[in-house]
Image (tube, rainbow, N blue to C red):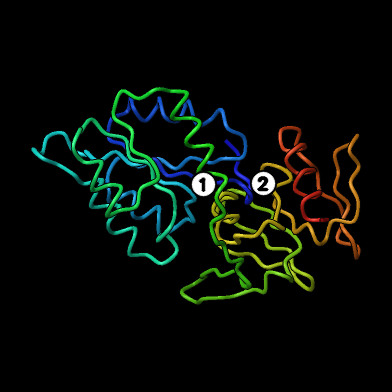
Amino acid sequence: MFMQSTDKQILIVEDNMHSMDKACALINRIDGVFIHKAENSEQAYRYALEYHIDLFIVDIILNTNIPGDIAGTKFVESIRKIDRYKFTPIIFTTALEDANLYAYAQLHCYRYFEKPYDNDEFLETVKETLKFQTEKKENRYYKYKKDFVHYIIKVEDIVYFEIDHNTSHIHCKDEVVDAPYKSTKNTLLELNSERFLKCNKNTIVNADYVESVDIVNRYAYLRDGYGKLEIGIRLKQSFLEGLQRCSK
C-alpha cells in the first residue's frame, strides 16, 4: 500500500489477529488513509512517537493471558500525556462491559464499541473522526546521520528524493547529497509536508519545482533545468491530485 503525506494515519492496537484483520478490511474502504498495526502497547507507543497519528483504535484487553488486563487503557493514559495527542480521537473496542464510563470520562474517548460490533456503525464512526483536523507542523529541515555525523538540509532547497536499495539520493538546488537509505514511506513521514509527493516507486518530488506535467507520457517536468521524472501508473491519480492541492 502506497502512502502519501496527505493520508490520515490510523493506529490500530489489537492483539487478536481476526479482530485486527476485520478492522483493517473495513477501514481500507476509506480513501486517503494509512493504517499502522500494533499488537501490544509497547509497539503502539513507538508508532505514536515516530509518526503523527490522526486516530487511535484501541482494544482495552491486549493480553488475554493476564487476568484483568487493561493494557489498552494504560496505553491511552500515556498517550494523553503527549501534547499533540491530548485531543486526538480515540475509539475503544473491547469485550468488557463496564469500562465505558472510565473511557469516556477520564480518557475522553470519542466512541466505545463492545465486541462484536456492527460493521457499518464502526465504519461511519471512523469516517466521522477523520473529519477532525489535527495539528501538523511541517518540518523546515530534513535530518539524516552519516558516519556518526548529523546533517540537516533546508526542506525548501530539496528538489526531489531518488531512493534505491542502499542510498537516498537527495537532489538539492545546488548539489546531490547521498544519505543512508530511508524508505519513501519514512521519508514522507519525516518531511510531514503536503508539498512532497510520491511520483513513482522510488521518487518523491517537491511540488514547488514541478513546472508542467505530460499526462499522456507520464512525466513531470521540473523547472530551472532539473530534468524530468517518470510518474508511476498506480500513482498517477494521487500525484495529480496532490499537485492540484499544492497549487491552491
Q: Which mark is residue 9?
A: 1
In the rendered view, would you say 134 is above or below 123? below
Within the image, what quadrant is residue 65 found in?
A: top left
Where, quadrant-wise, is the C terminus in this rendering?
bottom right
In the rendered view, would you say 114 is above or below 38? above
Q: Say which of 133 and 213 sits in front.
A: 133
Q: Say which of 213 and 194 sits in front.
A: 194
Q: Say which of 179 and 118 sits in front.
A: 118
Taking the spot 58% from the left edge, 32% from the top edge, the residue there is 30
Q: Say which of 133 and 166 sits in front.
A: 133
Label 2 sits on residue: 202
Q: Is residue 222 left or right of residue 159?
A: right
Within the image, what quadrant is residue 110 found in?
A: top left
**Residue 99 place in picture, x, y as percent:** 21, 41
Within the image, what quadrant is residue 190 found in?
A: bottom right
Q: Nearer the viewer, mark 1 or mark 2?
A: 1
Taking the spot 89% from the left edge, 61% from the top edge, the residue there is 223
- Amino acid type of the residue tagged 2 in the rendering: Asn
**Residue 215 place in picture, x, y as percent:** 89, 38
Mark 2 closeness class: few <14, some 14–19, many ≥20 residues within 10 Å:
some
Marks 1/2: CA distance? 21 Å
Q: Is residue 223 left or right of residue 239?
A: right
In the rendered view, would you say 148 is above or below 201? below
**Residue 52 place in picture, x, y as percent:** 49, 56
Q: Earlier in the sequence, mark 1 or mark 2?
A: 1
